[in-house]
Image (cartoon, rainbow, N blue to C red):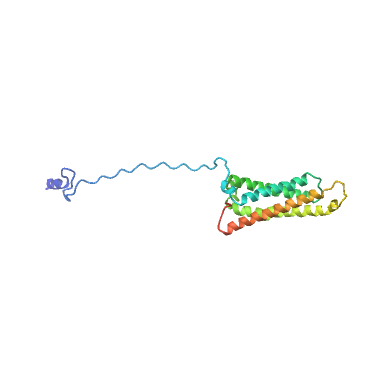
Amino acid sequence: MFGSRAQRKWLPGGTDGRTGSGPRPQRCAMPPPAPPAAPPPARGPLSLHRPFLRSPLAPLRLGQLLLGAACWGTVAAHKYEGAAHFALFAAVLAWLLALALSGLSLLGRWALVPLLGARWLLANAAHDLALGAGLYAAAAGVMGHKAARHSYCSLPGYSQPCLYRAYLAAAACAALAAALHLLSGLYCLARRRRGHRDIV
């Protein structure tokens, strides 16, 4: 009785006597797990961010830097006093901020900036509309007022040294720089309204 059960359970060839089925299927060997992928480098080599160069923001930033340098360079190269000190400070501060924004955008490294990196589009818009346009507009107003006070230098036959043309040139450069900051700020706001979260 026990022998018949053993014969039914194990038959030659590895078959099961109860079912009469063929050889038992063997389990497929699982492939070894793939090694984990290496994380991307936190800081790659420096290179130009070409999408920024192709965007409308790049020529605007270049114009802001050139006009800003012309503004504070003109004031610093001539004798200045009184409110011209504030105009020089405002122009230099706005120029340095625009230089920092341009450099980070050109290299594509704004993500390294704490707090502002994740909101780079809004940071650019706030700088352009509040700081850039505001500071240059104030500098243009100051230098324009000082140029008006020296307008007698433009009279025919006046041959004494005068700062009228220098003040007028500084005021014009500051006004144009303020206009370019206004344009770039509006561009950033337009991108934000279209649902973009970055400058390019």
Residue 144 placement: quadrant: bottom right
Could you say which is closer to the camera, residue 114 or residue 96? 96
State how many labels appear: 0
Residue shown at 77%/45% (left/top)? 76
Most distant residue in the front direction: 156
Q: Is residue 106 above or below residue 186?
A: above
Residue 47 point in image, percent of width and height:
57, 42
Q: Does residue 54 appear to the left or right of 137 in the view shown?
A: left
Locate residue 32, reporting x and y percent. 36, 41
Q: Quadrant of residue 45?
A: top right
Q: Is residue 90 left or right of residue 100?
A: right
Task: Name the residue located 81 percent from the left edge and 52 percent from the top edge.
Answer: 147
Q: Is residue 86 visible?
A: no
Tell me where residue 25 appears, x and y as whole percent.
24, 46
Residue 6 located left or right of residue 63:
left
Residue furthest out toward the top: 45
Q: Residue at x 60, y 58 (%)?
A: 190
Question: Observer-nearest residue: 2 or 161?
Answer: 161
Residue at 61% across, 57% down:
189
169, 88: nearer the viewer: 169
Image coords of residue 139 (percent x, y): 75, 52
**Hey, which residue is sitting farthest bottom in the picture?**
193
Asked whether residue 191 appears in the rendered view, the answer is yes
